[in-house]
Image (tube, rainbow, N blue to C red):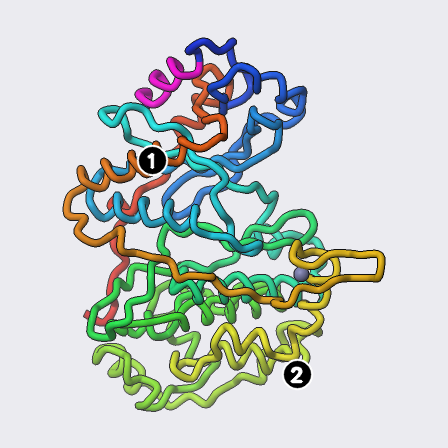
Amino acid sequence: MAVVGSHSRQMAYNGAPAPREHAILSATQPFYQAATVTRTDVEPDRPIGYGAFGVVWSVTDPRDGKRVALKKMPNVFQNLISCKRVYRELKMLFYFRHDNVLKALDILQPPHIDFFEEIYVVTELLQSDLHKIIVSPQPLSADHVKVFLYQILRGLKYLHSANILHRDIKPGNLLVNSNCVLKICDFGLARVIEPDENRHMTLEVVTQYYRAPEILTGAKHYSYGVDVWSVGCIFAELLGRRILFQAQSPVAQLDLITDLLGTPNMEDLKHACEGAKAHILRGAQKPPTLAALYNLSNQATHEAVHLLCRMLVFNPDKRIKCIDALAHPYLDEGRLRYHTCMCRCCHNTSSGRQYTSDFEPIAPVPFDSNFEDHLTTAHQVKDRLHTFITDRHHGNSVPLCINPHSAAFKSFASSSVASASELPPSPQPWE
Ligand SMILES: [Zn+2]
């Protein structure tokens, strides 16, 4: 843990004046020191969240005094799986160019490869997330729900057009700023779509409450529908201000889903494993109770419930696609509000608002995952990652590094969460 700090200290003090006491970040050029002014005195560096595989702090960029998010990715090189996951997440963060998807702004200089254990990424900073907002007492109007749902789907359409599955869409991974702009974050579990249906995909994904039925029933292959299911659960949670399917175990989770949707027929169970099929068919035949969705809140209008019912479909082949959900009339007002006063793609001119020609843009080119081919050892990935980060610093920007003298650095350095390899595997209930 101290290795990065001590090495970075050398970099920070190499010809530069002593960095500010408060700031975790330093710039490696002295002439940027003055730009921090007094904002760090008002807003000290502090922790703001924990993703699936890292801790996030709110810090000040010493080059311009702006507040940014600093994500620490610890224990990166423990094994090949965690190395590849981090490499993939970094590649994605630097690939993203969309206002509803969090992107990387910078990455801290790595130490010599012999001391390279952790990675620090700088991203845009948003003050809150949808989980905090949903559990807060602040009112959520119908307009709020519409503009949030619109932005979730807008960001997801972009991700899916890039062939990326997020696989952990949940309220805590939807960052929100004070203007209600929303960005999808945390790509620790994201991956490129697997086109070959015969290739098995891991079921160790998606926080249980937002997990799609095909994953709960042990399907060996799944696709974009898992993200759309999660969005449906979040849509209902925005309306009702409580988690839609909150069960104690994956089997109980599936039971709650069939309580609402009714017992699926054999066609809808074609992706399910035998154990899951037996469990569902063993129970009494349940009728659908979707009318209960009208009771979520008085904002659960016909249009809202209609779209919700198109997302919460048991069979992923029949579930609405992101692009079609965006075309649903329920989202017309959300789109208008977003592009009238929140977006960065439309502009005010002397003759009125100039709207963009494409309200929901797709990725210009799909995300290329070829870099993952032929990576067979953790050492090899570490080498590639080191080169990837070092190469990013050959541009014009002044590199950033850690200031180990910062008052907050000690707690930042020691903050950590379990890496994937340390998490207990969730039980596969059907085996
Ligand atoms: Zn716009």
Quadrant in which the N terminus appears: top left
Look at label 1 and name its amino acid.
Pro
Residue 125 percent location from the top left of the image? 57, 41
Q: Which residue is mark 2?
A: 302
Is 410 contained in the magenta span? Answer: no
Camera-nearest residue between 250 and 420:
420
> In which quarter of the view is residue 135 placed?
bottom right
Q: Main secondary structure of the magenta part?
A: helix
| Magenta-colored span | 2-12
Which residue occupies 37% across, 87% down? 264
Determine whether the residue tagged by mark 1 lies in a helix, strand or loop. Answer: loop
The numbered dot on residue 265 is: none
Farthest right residue in view: 350
Mark 2 or mark 1: whose residue is earlier in sequence: 1
Residue 431 percent location from the top left of the image? 18, 69
Q: Which residue is mark 1?
A: 74
> Is 326 rendered above or below residue 369?
below
> Is 341 rendered above or below residue 417?
below
Which residue occupies 53% across, 81% down? 309
> In which quarter of the view is residue 192 placed?
bottom left
Q: Where's ligand 1: which quadrant?
A: bottom right
Farthest left residue in view: 376
Camera-nearest residue between 19 and 362:
362
Which residue occupies 41% across, 58% down? 168
Image check: 10 left or right of 32? left
Image check: 47 left or right of 427? right
Determine whether the residue tagged by mark 2 lies in a helix, strand or loop. Answer: helix
